Image (cartoon, rainbow, N blue to C red):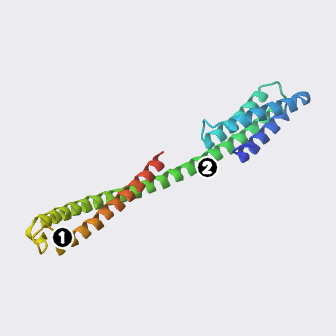
Amino acid sequence: MTKTPGAMRLAKGVLRLVCFFLPHEGRAERYTEWTAELFWILDDAEFSRGRRILHGMAYSIDQGRTVASLRLSTEAKKRLIALLAASVAVTATTSYSLHAVQAAKNNRISAELSALAAQETDLENRLHDTKRQLTQLTQKYYCELTGTGCRDASGHPGFGVEARKLQAARAMTSTRVKDIEAQLTGVRRQIRDLKA
């Protein structure tokens, strides 16, 4: 089963019509050979889905051109050329549709990248401010510990009420820093995945 069944049906239809212009004794063999080749063209993982479809249609049309170059009657050549022109029109329409879909996808990705970039900048600013706040709290905490207000009743260094408040504020701020860093890592991962 091919990954592009619609394109396979369309291209096989073109090949079936092209084979109609071949001598009767070689039709089935040529059709089988060409559809087997078409299957591999439409499933080639080296190319994107759109390119595989275009290659498959180009292959079918090219087989028609080859048959048209055989000695056919003028009327048969005209009918085959009309068939090929219709196939080219369908291929061009398909190509345009695929291009429009790809452009819409690119626009969506661009908008998502812009939103993520703004979110990344916001998180970086919040992280910077929170780290600065943590540094200030740490400095106040150590000043409080080394100051005279941090001695217990026997005169030994200990935790005063202010030191305990600063320690709790430091713990909360440290947790906020880790949360922001985790969010920032997630946003950067999303940006990297969209760019890939």
Q: Nearer the viewer, residue 157 or 50?
A: 157
Q: Determine the residue located farthest toward the front in the rendered image.
A: 154
**Which residue is identified by label 1?**
159
Task: Kindly tell me whether residue 138 is visible in this rendering.
Answer: yes
Instruction: Classify mark 2: helix, strand or loop.
Output: helix
Which of the two marks, 2 or 1, is nearer to us in this view?
1
Residue at 62% x, 43% y: name it.
Answer: 49
Q: Nearer the viewer, residue 118 or 9?
A: 118
Q: Specify the amino acid type for callout 1.
A: Phe
Residue shown at 42%/55% (left/top)? 186
Q: Secondary structure at mark 1?
A: loop
Q: CA distance from mark 2 to mark 1?
A: 72 Å
Label 2 crowding class (10 Å Cα cut-off): few <14, some 14-19, many 20+? few
Residue 194 % position (x, y) = 47, 50
* Quarter occupied by residue 137: bottom left
Q: Is residue 75 left or right of residue 130?
A: right
In the picture shown, does residue 94 fall above or below 137? above
Whether residue 114 is visible, yes or no, is no
Q: Residue furthest right?
A: 25
The residue wearing badge 2 is 97
Total labels: the figure holds 2
Q: Could you tell me the amino acid type at mark 2?
A: Ser
111 versus 165 height, above or below: above
The answer to whether 87 is drawn above or below residue 181 in the figure is above
Q: Position of residue 104 (x, y in %)?
A: 53, 53
Residue 83 shown left or right of residue 89 in the figure: right
Identified at 28% across, 66% down, the residue is 171
Q: Residue 90 at x, y = what percent?
A: 69, 45
